Image (cartoon, rainbow, N blue to C red):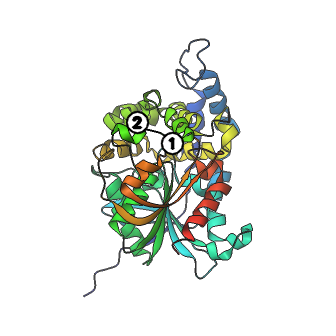
Amino acid sequence: MTPNKPEIHPFRIDIPPADLDDLRNRLARTRWPDELDGVAWSYGVPVSYARKLAEYWGTDYDWRRHEAELNRFPQFTTEIDRQNIHFLHVRSPEPDALPLIVTHGWPGSVVEFMKIIGPLTDPRSHGGDPGDAFHVVAPSIPGFGFSGPTAETGWDMPRVARAWAELMDRLGYERYGAQGGDSGSFIAPELGRVAPERVVGVHVNGGLGFPSGDPAEFENLSEAEQTRMARHSEDGLGYAIIQSTRPQTVAYGLHDSPAGQLAWITEKFQEWTDPARDLPEDAVDLDQLLTNVSVYWLTGTAASSARLYKESAAVWGQPQEYSALPHGMAAFPTDYAIRRVAERDHKVVHWTEFDRGGHFAAMEAPDLLVGDIREFFRLVR
């Protein structure tokens, strides 16, 4: 007797009106902290800036409009390894399209991909070559958004990669590519190690591998590499240290205060977006940023998303099995990408450095990211 095939269920986002009313009420009743004069962003998000964003979020931002935009993408849920998995699955009109699984990170979500899904799935309608088409699968990482919260320990990045292999198998894709940014830039290469007979190539933005601590890895860096590395000092890693050690403690404030959740995420958009831009909304669309924050708030996943750092702390910086699959890298100005580090554990066949955009490339420079994904996968289709 053949076991029952795990079910895949259609999904549609439909936030209860009471939850939106509660969000607006909480924003209106925010108890704002004091701040020092003249310190700008050096102590964190300035109160004046946070208040401006919170006021817009609570009065002028229209969740229902953006919810409808998200719902234009076919969405589904399925259970893998005892965990609910939410994903977008947008098939290309081109019959020979290559399946591609794309993975976000923290503080991102599938909202990041709203501007790249159309050009990736239907290049013919976006001025591109139909031969570059992809069937796009964009899952929410367990613990994030509509894949959250998680209900047990152990959901580190290797386990996520194993779940992605199962998801693609369940969708019937025997040959596919993998792409990711932030945490996705570690999950996508790990998926290549989990399913090397299925994954034809891995493309990432953000970084490809952690430095090992060997001083030789930092010798004779290019000027661009030196600039990118200088932006990743200990001063900007406080969030990661907290989330990788005490994610539950920080979650109380984030889960109870939308202003707290907004500031926690917005700080990273200030630090990681294009350095040529003064404020986050100069680099990304403000409504798209707030839609991303809203997903965290409305799904109550501040704690479970932060747990990815705690669960994965043991594997950060550890030696990895060399992957002989073709890898491509799109390095943007705020990324910590060092080619010699990437080549230590991966076969790198494509490397592009951009002088525009930043860490949230799918939101900041979708044209550049889409172009680089297309260029890399032409090598391996």
For image coordinates 68% across by 56% down, the residue present is 367
Residue in front for this viewpoint, 235 or 111: 235
- Whether residue 78 is visible to the viewer of this picture, yes or no, is no
Q: State how far apart marks 1 and 2 are (Cα).
A: 19 Å
| Relative horizontal placement of residue 164, taking residue 380 as reference (left or right) | left
Give the residue at mark 2. Answer: 240
Between residue 262 and residue 125, name the one nearer to us: 125
Residue 305: % across, % down: 41, 45
Rendered image quadrant of residue 191 = bottom left
Identify the residue under disc 1.
Answer: 297
Query: What element does badge 1 sit on?
Result: helix
Secondary-structure class at tag 2: helix
Sequence order check: which comes first, mark 1 or mark 2?
Answer: 2
Residue at 55% of width from left, 58% of height from top?
Answer: 13
Residue 111 shows in this picture: yes
Residue type highlighted by circle 1: Trp
Toward the front, the furthest residue is 220
Number of numbered discs visible in the structure rendering: 2
Residue 371 shown left or right of residue 327 in the figure: right
